[in-house]
Amino acid sequence: MTQFNDTELTAAVIKSFEQTPNSRARFLLQELVKSLHDYVRKTDLSFEEWDTAIGFLTRTGQKCTDIRQEFILLSDVLGVSMLVDAVNHRDRDGATETTVLGPFYVGEHKVTPHGSDISADLSGERMFVQSRVTDLGGKPLAGVPVDVWHADQDGFYDSQRPSYATDGPSSRARFVTDADGRFHFRTIVPCSYPIPTDGPVGQMIMQTNRHPMRPAHVHFLVNARGYEPLITHVFVEGDKYIDSDVVFGVKDELIAKVEKRTDPVMPDGKPADGPWHLMTYEFHVKPGGGLAPAPLGTKATEDA
Amino acid sequence: MTQFNDTELTAAVIKSFEQTPNSRARFLLQELVKSLHDYVRKTDLSFEEWDTAIGFLTRTGQKCTDIRQEFILLSDVLGVSMLVDAVNHRDRDGATETTVLGPFYVGEHKVTPHGSDISADLSGERMFVQSRVTDLGGKPLAGVPVDVWHADQDGFYDSQRPSYATDGPSSRARFVTDADGRFHFRTIVPCSYPIPTDGPVGQMIMQTNRHPMRPAHVHFLVNARGYEPLITHVFVEGDKYIDSDVVFGVKDELIAKVEKRTDPVMPDGKPADGPWHLMTYEFHVKPGGGLAPAPLGTKATEDA
């Protein structure tokens, strides 16, 4: 048959994938065809709209670099990332809630001594972060690498700054838990910030009258051997955008009170240089495997 | 509300687009969210699969250049392009059938005198193409620009060759119809060819055990003022792949018998240098407006 009406066409495309060797890939592709075709039929998509979509997807791909992932950002603002998170984490069994990875995990995390100030070069209110990693029974887990990253006082990640190439990471580090499962570090209090609006995804958000803001948070990636990698944030309680995160990433359990302190010493006994804030958060991980996400740049361009 | 179960999440994302000023854009985005979320839920998409999709889309965008459009190719092999074509051309009223634009319309078409050999530099069996453009009542339309392009004897378009930048177009031209609505030109008989398999889309086709072939055809874009732009191909009858075009683009009415001839002169009275083929096809266009597609490179990178 060479000529199709529109339902015959859909059937023909689904059939064309019948010889896909991997049955899961076959299922995913055939469902994708159904879903895309249903969308075109339901919306009676015009050529101009199709052309706009092609242009948008092209620009989204072309905005990606080794240190920026515009397609993850698109997935994030459409709630797809959080939905993938939800369907893969239906039973937490007491483990810490997960949230989006976000587009700024660049895999440049260097093991850093406990207590270090990872934002020493930044202005902003100082914060001491103390944390612990345990299993579901509360047993501390030692030797666990924990990647940490957050935006600076202007709402930018280090990798968004032109100086990143020369100056290297800032507000971004890896800590390894001690025998008691603990780690601690100094940094600044993060602030709420807009997703990048200089690319197609941010522009779409502005054009649709959504605000582009994320509430203040610190990213954590807890990667204990023999446990599910835990990708999450800790959000700062009271942030103006806590109820309207542009990527739908907030969960109640992940909101931490960040307390203002005036004690002359911080919890590790070292002197505080003025008022400071304390963030305390414990992570509980569940048994399992799986790889932590690959850093950007190692996959997106693998056969480009 | 900060925490969503998966259906609340979908509702929240749909609601986030409520303030989109353009009602059609709002509808398209909200339906897109529903469709994407239904897909994730139905397939229980894993993180690894999501990650594979992000990487695939990124590479697809990054494969696009001013002269290559990998996202159009993706739309083509998933049957989306032909479906958009179908839903926008439900009533032909006798107008010539349409098919996909394809990824090789580069908008470099130079007005060329009738009778020119547009593949003079190529080996291959010679073909004389004679054609006419009329309205639905058969009235000839004069002064209509008709863009023509096809693959060479190895199955490549000029723009796929490294020499394109220096040598310019080949097997690609624009003819303007004469007072009788006619135009004619010389070229080679096109052959069936694979879509490019050096990019993510072609690789996906190979990995799913689909063949990557398109049956032999010549592209035509007939762009008469006051009429619907007609984007179509004429296919060569008898091609091995006529029933299994990788982009689902064949329609019965678009198949032409290409006759072998041994007459010593061609239809324009000029001598034939050995045996040749004759392709005859008439295009009928319907009243309407709309812009012809923009050439590649003018849109895909507009704000990249």
Image: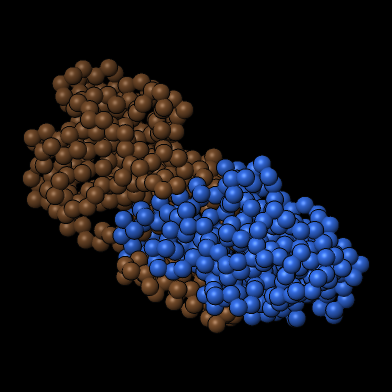
Chain colours: A brown, B blue
Examine the rendered structure and indicate whether residue A289 appears above or below residue A145. Answer: below
Residue placed most toward the observer, A189 or B55: B55
Residue that sits furthest to the right in the current view: B179
In this rendering, position of residue A201 left or right of residue A240: right
Question: Which residue is at a point 31% across and 60% down the rendered structure image?
Answer: B46
Question: Which residue is at a point 48% across and 73% down the rendered structure image?
Answer: A13
Measured as percent of width and height from the top left, residue A123 is found at: 38, 22
In this rendering, position of residue A294 left or right of residue B178: left
Q: How many marks?
A: 0
Quarter the N terminus of chain B occupies: bottom left
- Quarter-of-image position of residue A110: top left
Residue placed most toward the observer, B113 or A54: B113
Quarter the C terminus of chain B occupies: top right
Question: Which residue is at a point 39% across and 46% down the rendered structure image?
Answer: A302
- Quarter-of-image position of residue B236: bottom right
Measured as percent of width and height from the top left, residue A301 is found at: 41, 45
Measured as percent of width and height from the top left, residue B118 is found at: 74, 57
Residue placed most toward the observer, A259 or A197: A197
Examine the rendered structure and indicate whether residue B204 appears above or below residue A293. Answer: below
- Quarter-of-image position of residue B207: bottom left
Residue placed most toward the observer, B137 or B210: B210
Q: Is residue A278 visible?
A: no
Question: Which residue is at a point 47% across and 28% down the rendered structure image?
Answer: A162
In this rendering, position of residue A86 left or right of residue B199: left
Q: Is residue A156 visible?
A: yes
Examine the rendered structure and indicate whether residue B66 appears above or below residue B33. Answer: above
Measured as percent of width and height from the top left, residue B130 is found at: 79, 70
